[in-house]
Amino acid sequence: MNTAWAVSSPCTTGCVAHGVGPVPAGTALRRYAAFGAAVTGAFAGRGHGALADPAALRRRARAVLAALGVRRLGGDGELSAPGRSGTLIVANHISWLDVVALLAREPVTPLAKREVGGWPVVGGLATRAGTCFIDRDGFRRLPEQVATVRELLRAGRSVAVFPQATTWCSPYGGTFRRAMFQAALDAGAPVRPVTVSYRQDGAPSTVAAFVGDDGFVPSLHRVARADGLSVHLEAHGLLYPDAWPDRRALARAAQDAVLGPRRLPSPTDPAPSRCGHAPPPSDHARPASGLPVSGLPVSDLLPSGLPASSPPSSTPPVSGPRSSTPPSSEPSPALHLPPRRLHA
């Protein structure tokens, strides 16, 4: 496997914990029963596209969250922008619940790695919901995959992607891969950055994180036992493609909106040793030099804002274009979790 494509996260199951005491066993059993009923109802339709009907898809996604006792926060407004093209919805990735939460807000076409289709329960639901599966076993198919997303956007279908390409235990980890932003540029489609976070009794929590070598069943068990769990979707202002010179700048703007601005690493920085528990260090986000918008070099598999082979420039920070619509008025909660020792 090409190492540039193999994205990893330092988060492990050691990151994951209940923020408050779990619910009683009886409550968890009732949630399992409700979850089973919600999933059975989703599979009751005929054909792989049975859930593609927007009303049915939203209803089933909300039923899954309600069955597990997960409250939805952040409003019910649609994430897509009005217009002839669809919207590229980009979000950070924490849990398998992320997709369910997005579909409960607005029925969109999720983009997922092909392995997700084989996951218990969630894989079947994803397939029937019309998920666009892609292969991540190499970069040679990347132009084809970008073209698929471009055509979906041109056809008026909004697509949800997770540019971190892996899961982190909190909203602050990772960086955005920029390849799929080319699809938005080619289609002339707006980009909607969305920050996904989880809380228990109003405090940030990692209990829903699906990281490391975690399995679906243990993760489902934690979620079913979680008390006061809620998922918050914070929609940021739209980014219109004509305001950005290339996919690198567009990806960096979306990353800064979702994860918060951060500075580029310095050669004197220590080796990274923390996961996404804490907000990253930041200063002014510096737009990187432009790349040709035609073709997809291997550097598109690298984090946005990092050059493929040259060290960071000493050019002073320069403010980039701003989003064309104002962000949500509700501020993002800051995570203040205790430091954690990473496990090998």
Image: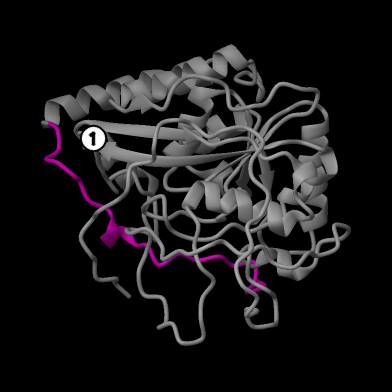
Q: Image height check: is 282 above or below 224?
A: below
As displayed, is residue 204 above or below residue 237?
below
User: At numbered mark 1, what does the secondary structure look like: helix, strand or loop?
Assistant: loop
Residue drawn 44% across the image and 30% down it? 329
Identity of the residue furthest to the bottom in this view: 268
Q: Nearer the viewer, residue 227 or 308?
A: 308
Quadrant where the image shows the N terminus: bottom right
Q: Residue flagged by tag 1: what amino acid is it?
A: Gly
Residue 18 highlighted magenta (yes or no): yes
The residue sitting at 63% across, 48% down in the picture is: 114
Residue drawn at the location 57% of the way across and 12% of the way down = 55
Residue 91: which quarter of the image? top right
**Relative horizontal placement of residue 229, taking residue 116 as reference (left or right):** left
Confirm whether residue 84 shows in the render. Answer: yes
Front residue of 98 and 255? 255
So how many labels did they put on this image?
A: 1
Q: With 303 as the anchor, is 70 left or right in this view? A: left
Left or right for 286, reference 221: right
Image quadrant where residue 285 sits: bottom right
Whether residue 92 can be seen here: no
The spot of residue 249 in percent (x, y) is 70, 57
Query: Which of the colour schemes (rainbow, by chain, secondary structure, one colour) is used?
Result: one colour
User: For the C terminus, which image quadrant?
Assistant: bottom left
Please tell me how crowded label 1 is: few (under 14), some (14-19), or many (20+) other residues with Cα within 10 Å: few
Q: Position of residue 316 (x, y in %)?
A: 61, 72
Q: Main secondary structure of the magenta part?
A: loop
Quick check: 336 above or below 68?
A: below
Report the span colored magenta.
Answer: 1-23
- Image spot of residue 325 (x, y percent): 62, 32
Q: Position of residue 291 (x, y in %)?
A: 80, 65
Residue that numbered label 1 is attached to: 202
Q: Quadrant of residue 87?
A: top right
